[in-house]
Image (cartoon, helix red, strand yellow):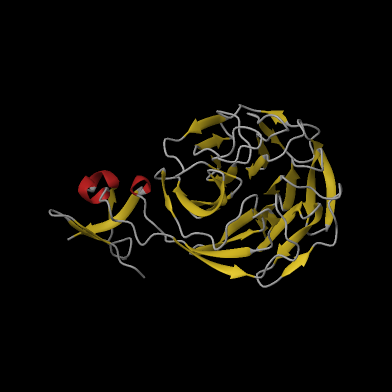
């Protein structure tokens, strides 16, 4: 067990474990600001270590991925033609799903997990949102797309799915749609602050974080914006913090209290860049680079236990070819104490 000691020229605060009968209840207002907001009082930061795993059997670009029930699913994509299957990593090996996408495959699409199902939307090859049920081993058509477009972004929050932007052969879109898979139509919500396709999105604490993305069809330099959508209030917020450079067509993954923005195009070049965004502090820094350069790749992860999780990034494109390369990122999550959320603590002064 780690001990935490806060040093100040006037105050030494030590935290002990003791019975509630002996405890003094002290609110945060009684702790001097020099202690409460000391600049280096967090424990060791989160860490990320990448390793290579077995290559995906069928190399695919313009693909997407999700993490569900401790398995990683790379969903469809492009491999000389539209690829129609899910490729599944169980922690030790890959397997191909035995049922194919109902439209013979899809690429340049987005996907999310909803209620134990994998929802796929947008892309080339289907005018519908489609649903893959890993337990029943079935694909079905769900709701027709409001606009048939590519490189949409999608996330699932509080029992609803949200679809953002996308591009056609001439333009990028502002639109935000909300729906429950199976409903006859999607509900148009507040537009994004600007047109975007190829964004990297992920959910954190009931809100959807959208990173970078392109402002026009085929624009691969990307943007450096960070936007946050609150489904409860239907409000978009533009953050003052930015990515280090314009980026698009990578992946964003939430593990614990950090968001990892991985690979993609960075100013028109295919990259291995990893940036780590702290949504609590609204700050960003570089993380360990991916072990291969890729764009239009798949990626997802999950917090497996309170102290750690994993990220899988697979496929994509580099040098004009579809990739089968795959990396596993091991994330160790520290149980940090945030000054803004101390609440009431039990402590004693010496």
In the image as oriented, which residue stretches furthest toward the front? 319
**7 lies left or right of 261:** left
Give whichever of 60, 17 is nearer the camera: 60
In the image as oriented, which residue stretches furthest toward the bottom? 92
Question: Picture coordinates of residue 307 (x, y %)?
Answer: 48, 64
**143 lies left or right of 90:** right
**189 lies left or right of 18:** right
Give whichever of 36, 103 is nearer the camera: 103
Tally of numbered discs:
0
Question: Picture coordinates of residue 196 (x, y %)?
Answer: 61, 34
Question: Picture coordinates of residue 117 (x, y %)?
Answer: 74, 51
The residue at the point 65 percent across, 49 percent down is 296
In the image as oriented, which residue stretches furthest toward the left? 10
Query: In which quadrant will I find the C terminus?
Result: bottom left
Q: Is residue 323 above or below residue 113?
A: below
Query: In which quadrant will I find the N terminus?
Result: bottom left
The residue at the point 23 percent across, 48 percent down is 31
Give whichever of 344, 251 is nearer the camera: 251
**262 lies left or right of 337:** right
Q: Is residue 17 above or below residue 155?
A: below
Give whichever of 157, 296 is nearer the camera: 296
The residue at the point 76 percent across, 67 percent down is 95
The picture quadrant where one finds residue 73 is bottom right
Question: Picture coordinates of residue 304 (x, y %)?
Answer: 57, 63
């Amino acid at each position: 067990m780690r001990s935490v000691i806060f040093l100040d020229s006037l105050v030494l605060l030590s935290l002990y474990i003791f019975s509630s009968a002996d405890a003094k209840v002290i609110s945060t207002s009684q702790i001097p600001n020099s202690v409460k907001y000391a600049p280096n009082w967090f424990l060791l930061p989160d860490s990320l270590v990448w390793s290579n795993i077995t290559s995906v059997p069928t190399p695919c670009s313009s693909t997407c991925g999700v993490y569900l029930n401790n398995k990683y699913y790379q969903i469809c994509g492009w491999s000389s033609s539209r690829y129609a299957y899910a490729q599944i990593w169980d922690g030790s090996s890959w397997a191909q799903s035995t049922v194919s996408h109902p439209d013979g495959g899809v690429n340049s699409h987005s996907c999310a997990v909803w209620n134990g199902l994998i929802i796929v939307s947008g892309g080339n090859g289907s005018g519908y949102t489609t649903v893959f049920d890993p337990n029943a081993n079935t694909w079905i058509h769900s709701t027709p797309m409001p606009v048939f477009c590519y490189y949409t972004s999608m996330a699932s929050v509080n029992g609803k799915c949200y679809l953002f932007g996308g591009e056609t052969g001439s333009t990028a879109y502002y639109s935000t749609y909300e729906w429950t898979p199976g409903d006859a139509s999607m509900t148009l919500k507040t537009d994004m602050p600007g047109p975007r396709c190829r964004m990297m999105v992920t959910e954190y604490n009931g809100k959807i974080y959208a990173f970078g993305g392109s402002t026009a069809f085929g624009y691969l330099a990307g943007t450096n914006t960070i936007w946050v959508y609150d489904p409860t209030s239907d409000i978009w917020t533009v953050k003052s913090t930015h990515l280090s450079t314009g980026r698009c067509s990578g992946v964003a993954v939430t593990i614990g209290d950090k968001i990892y923005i991985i690979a993609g195009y960075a100013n028109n070049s295919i990259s291995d860049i990893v940036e780590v965004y702290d949504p609590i502090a609204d700050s960003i820094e570089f993380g360990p680079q991916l072990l291969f350069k890729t764009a239009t790749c798949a990626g997802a992860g999950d917090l497996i236990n309170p102290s750690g999780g994993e990220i899988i990034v697979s496929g994509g494109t580099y040098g004009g070819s579809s990739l089968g390369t795959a990396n596993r990122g091991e994330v160790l999550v520290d149980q940090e104490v945030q000054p803004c959320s101390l609440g009431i603590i039990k402590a004693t002064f010496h």
